[in-house]
Image (cartoon, helix red, strand yellow):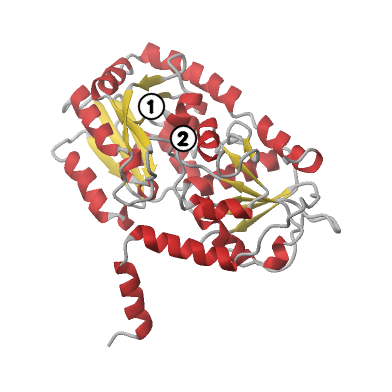
């Protein structure tokens, strides 16, 4: 016999997704501690919060920031903080007497109040609160208004996200790209044989988490473009590295059905440590991302830093660092954003639908090893110029010396 709690949970799950999310966000907004009205002075260093131990884009952003601060010897604390974790007692080791290090919380706006609630009023009192947010549409969802009330300022990884969110926190947004070039992940000592991949063939890698949204990441287009470009050629292989597949079985079945009958398409669904994921990318020749939209684009950026040829949709944040001099951008048309999960939707929002012929042309151009060598060298140089971390350290300095109004 079901308990009243389990029955209530089942009834709750029957409600539409959007009302559930609004109800949770509204409840957290009531319970969460508000930031101090007057900007608190800050100590040197930072407290980096987020899904530090989870394989998500925001979690990786928090880890990248931690490595960047470590590379410069800047004091930091890291705390696990999110919708279901983050209860913390006591002060940060970065605090200096009455001064507290700023909290830079890599949790998006809809879940931000809940994360603050779990951290607790005592920890947050007299502390500068910075939200590090990424959003993938040119218009924010109405859910984002909840978190906007709980930040002193917002940092974002791209101009694309900044333009989308400016109306929520006018005058309080800084563009702070991920400092990837400061302390990149060192690939594990693993070659193609370590992953069961053959030598002497062209390997195209698609890498993403299904938790980030299948419709947005658009692997169906990647499979169709690869099959149109290379058919069943045994000297060409598409590797789809997908994480969190077990949590989205229906979507995984759709992806597998699209690849059915293709012996030159393989799936890698194991969770790999960052060093092994980097080794898989290093073992590939081309990285393909036919996304509909990106708030930053970690995979294309990491691939460029590694000197890989990147084929990417020429829209949203990736277009800020990838062009035809350092990669192979794919043309597109804009269509209304429609997400079956209801996450990436906002009235009037649109995103990209890639042109299949353009994607096929890019894949065939990438067959040329001389072109890949040229593009890889240009990509590494461009990534070093874009992701050097200066914006991060300027933002930290500004928190102490010249805060936003």
Contact, mark 2 vs mark 1 (Cβ under 8 Å): yes
Left or right side of 385 for 337: left
- Tell me what residue is drawn at x 51 percent, y 67 percent: 27
Q: Secondary structure at mark 1?
A: strand
Q: Secondary structure at mark 2?
A: loop
Residue count near mark 1 (Cα–Cα under 10 Å), binned few <14, some 14–19, many ≥20: many
Can you identify the residue that label 1 sits on?
312
Q: Position of residue 344 (x, y in %)?
A: 38, 45
Residue count near mark 2 (Cα–Cα under 10 Å), binned few <14, some 14–19, many ≥20: many
348 relative to 47, above or below: above
Q: Nearer the viewer, residue 149 or 101?
A: 149
Q: Nearer the viewer, residue 305 or 209?
A: 209
Q: Nearer the viewer, residue 141 or 89?
A: 141
Left or right side of 375 for 162: right
- Tell me what residue is drawn at x 39 percent, y 63 percent: 20
Q: Outermost residue, right direction? A: 97
Can you identify the residue that label 2 sits on?
297
> Which quadrant of the rendered structure holds the C terminus?
top right
Q: Label 2 to label 1, Cα distance in Å?
A: 10 Å
Is residue 358 visible in the rendered structure shown here? Answer: yes
260 relative to 88, above or below: above
């Amino acid at each position: 016999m079901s308990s009243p709690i389990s029955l209530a949970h089942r009834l709750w799950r029957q409600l539409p997704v959007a009302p559930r999310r609004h109800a949770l966000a509204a409840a957290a907004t009531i319970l969460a501690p508000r930031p101090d009205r007057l900007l608190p002075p800050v100590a040197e260093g930072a407290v980096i919060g987020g899904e530090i131990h989870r394989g998500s884009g925001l979690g990786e952003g928090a880890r990248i920031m931690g490595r960047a601060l470590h590379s410069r010897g800047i004091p930091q604390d890291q705390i696990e903080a999110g919708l279901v974790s983050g209860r913390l007692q006591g002060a940060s080791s970065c605090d200096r007497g009455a001064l507290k290090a700023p909290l830079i919380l890599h949790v998006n706006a809809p879940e931000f109040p809940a994360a603050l609630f779990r951290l607790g009023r005592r920890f947050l009192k007299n502390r500068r609160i910075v939200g590090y947010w990424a959003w993938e549409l040119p218009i924010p969802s109405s859910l984002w208004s909840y978190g906007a009330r709980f930040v002193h300022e917002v940092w974002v990884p791209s101009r694309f996200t900044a333009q989308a969110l400016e109306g929520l926190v006018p005058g309080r947004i800084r563009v702070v790209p991920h400092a990837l070039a400061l302390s990149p992940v060192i690939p594990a000592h693993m070659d193609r044989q370590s992953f069961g991949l053959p030598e002497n063939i062209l390997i195209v890698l698609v890498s993403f988490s299904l938790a980030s949204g299948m419709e947005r990441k658009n692997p169906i287009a990647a499979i169709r473009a690869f099959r149109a470009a290379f058919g069943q050629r045994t000297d060409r292989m598409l590797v789809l590295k997908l994480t969190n597949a077990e949590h989205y079985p229906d979507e995984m079945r759709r992806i597998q059905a699209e690849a059915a009958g293709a012996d030159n398409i393989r799936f890698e669904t194991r969770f790999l440590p960052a060093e092994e994921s980097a080794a898989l990318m290093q073992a590939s020749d081309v990285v393909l991302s036919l996304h509909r939209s990106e708030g930053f684009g970690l995979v294309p950026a990491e691939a460029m830093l590694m000197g890989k040829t990147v084929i990417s949709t020429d829209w949203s944040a990736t277009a800020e660092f990838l062009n035809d001099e350092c990669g192979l951008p794919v043309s597109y048309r804009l269509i209304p954003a429609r997400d079956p999960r209801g996450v990436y939707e906002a009235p009037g929002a649109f995103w990209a639908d890639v042109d299949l012929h353009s994607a096929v042309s890019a894949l065939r151009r990438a067959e040329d090893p001389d072109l890949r060598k040229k593009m890889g060298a240009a990509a590494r140089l461009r990534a070093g110029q874009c992701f050097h971390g200066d914006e991060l350290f300027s933002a930290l300095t500004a928190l102490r010396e010249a805060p936003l109004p």
